[in-house]
Image (spheres, rainbow, N blue to C red):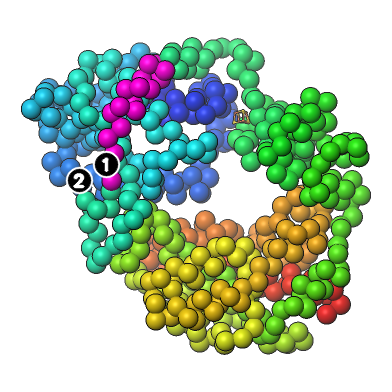
Amino acid sequence: MMKFITKTIYLQFIACAKNAWLQMNKPELKDMFALSDFDRSLVAKGNLVESWAQKLFPRGVLISEFGETARAATVERLAKKEPVIFQASFTSGRFLARNDVLEYDSRNDVWNLYEIKGTNTLDENENSPDHIEDVAFQVAVLEDNGLKLGKIYIIHLNKEYVREDDISVDELFIKEDVSREVRERLEATRIKMGSAAEILWEKDEKAVACLCLYSARSNHCSTFSYSHPEIPEYSVHDLSRIGASKSKLTELVDAKIYELGEIPDSFKLTAVQRNQVFVHKTQKPLIDSSAIGKEIGSLSYPLYFLDYETYPSAIPLFKGFRPYQQVPFQFSLHVLKDPQAEPEHFEYLHAENTDPSEKIIANLKKYIVPRGHVIVWNKRFEKGINAQLAERHPEAASFLNDLNERIYDLMEIFQKQLYVHPGFRGRVSIKKVLPVLVPSLSYQDLEIKEGGAAMEAWHDMVFGDKTRTEKQAAIRNLLKYCGLDTYAMYLIWRELAKLAAY
Ligand code: SF4
C-alpha cells in the first residue's frame, strides 16, 4: 500500500525531521509513538470541538470513508457542487490532505476552506502547533488537484464566550480569515513539502539526525533513548532549567560529559544546578533544618491540606463556564487541629452531570473555619480555582478570597532549596518528593495514578454510558486518588516538622 505524508506527519516533520522519519520508517518503534492518556484526551477534545464547529454548517455532508473510497466520494461531491463537504480527501504525489470543511461559493465558483482548531486563540509560539503551516499544506494539495480556492479560514474557540443555559455555537467559535497569511506562506511551504518528500523517503537513517543531544530533557521525544543509547537515563539534560542556558549544555555535551557526576567542580552552574550536582555526587541530601523550622513554625492551626481535582472542558459543560475553564468536581481535605493531633479527613466528589461549584463551596464551608493555614502543592492552581469559584459565586467571594489569603505552598520549601535530595532529580513535584520522604506511600497501587486520568475518569463517569457498578468503581478510585494527594502532603509536612524538631 502506498504510504502518504499526511498533514500530521508533515507537521511532525516541520517540528522534527528525525521524529517524522522514525514514524514513517521504523514500524518496530511503534510502542514509542503510542499515544499517552494525555494525548488521547487531546484527540478526543479535538474531535468534540470539530463536531460542535460542524454545526456552523447545517448543510454539510460528511465523507466518512477512508483511503481510495474517500477520494472517490470527494470527487463525486465536488462534481455535484455540494454546498458544504466535511472531510474531503485529496492526494498529490506523496501527500494526502483531509479538510475539515470545504464550502462552495456559487457566486464566485470557488471553494472556501475552513480548518477547525480546538484552541482558544491563533497565537503561535515555539510550543504551539503552527496553524498557518497546517492550512498552507492543505492549500498546496488542493491546488495541485486543480481546485479553485476562495477564502481560507481558521475556526477556533472564543475564549471570552461564557455559556448560558444552552450553547450558542455562533458565539462559541471565531472564524478568522487567514487567506493572506496562508498565501504569503505557500511558496515556502511547497519548498518544505519537497524536502519532506525527499527526507522521509531517505533510506539511510544516519542521513537524518536527532538534534536533541543539545536540548533539555523536556524537549526530547520518546525516541531520544533509541537515537542516543550512550546517554544515561538521568543526565546533564536533566539539570534544572538547563534549557535556559543552552551554551552550558552544549559545552558539556561537546566535552562528552553526560553524567552529572562527571561535571567538573569548576564548571559554572546556577545555585540550584550546583545543589543538584552536589547531592548527586555525594548521594546525600542538603537540608536547611533551621530555615525549614522557620517555615513550619510560621504556620497557624488548624492546618488544612487541600487539593482539587478539575476538568477543563473545551466546550463549556455548564452555564457560567468559558472554553477550557476548569470545572472543580472534587476536593480532599486533611485537617490537623494541632501538631500532635491525628489528621481528620473530609472530601467531596460531585458524581452528577450538573455544575459542582455550589456543592464544592458549601462543603468547603462545612469543614474550614476562618483561621489556620491552607496547605497546597503549587498554589497557583488552587488559588486560581478559588478565584474562579468566587467570580461565578460572588456570594461566597469573601470566604474564597480569605482561603486564598491563607494558602501556604508546601512545594516552596523544595523550590527554595531548603531540602534537596538526589532522589528528586532536580524536580519538586509531589510525585518526585513523596517517594523520597515517605517511601511507604505510593500512587503505584492505585487505579488512578495522576491528575489527567482522574479528570477523564470523572468525565466518563458523569457523561459516559456507565453501569451502576462502573460508576461506583470510578467513585472509589477517584476518592482514593485525591485522598492520597492530601494525605501525602500531610505526611511530607510531618517529615519536615520532625526534621525541624517541631
Ligand atoms: S529526541 Fe528530539 S531531535 Fe531526536 S527525534 Fe525526538 S524530537 Fe527529534
Give the spatial CA distance, label 1 vs label 2: 10 Å
Disc number for residue 27:
none
Q: Is residue 385 left or right of residue 117?
A: right
Q: Residue at x 86, y 51 (%)?
A: 279
Closer to the camera, 293 or 303?
293
User: Up-down: is 366 above or below 41?
Assistant: below
Q: Residue at x 61, y 13 (%)?
A: 207
Instruction: Please say whether residue 178 is one of the residues in the magenta stretch.
Output: yes
Give the magenta part as a residue range.
174-190
Tell me whether the residue at label 1 lies in contact with that at label 2, contact meaning CB atoms closer than 8 angstroms: yes
Disc number for residue 56:
2
Quarter in which the N terminus is drawn: top left
Whole-percent x, y for residue 419 in the image? 81, 61
User: Up-down: is 134 above or below 95?
Assistant: below
Q: Residue at x 44, y 68 (%)?
A: 388
Q: Name the residue tied to disc 1.
A: 175
Whole-percent x, y for residue 88 in the image? 24, 29
Q: What type of secondary structure mainly makes up the magenta span?
A: helix
Which amino acid does the dot numbered 1 rest on? Lys
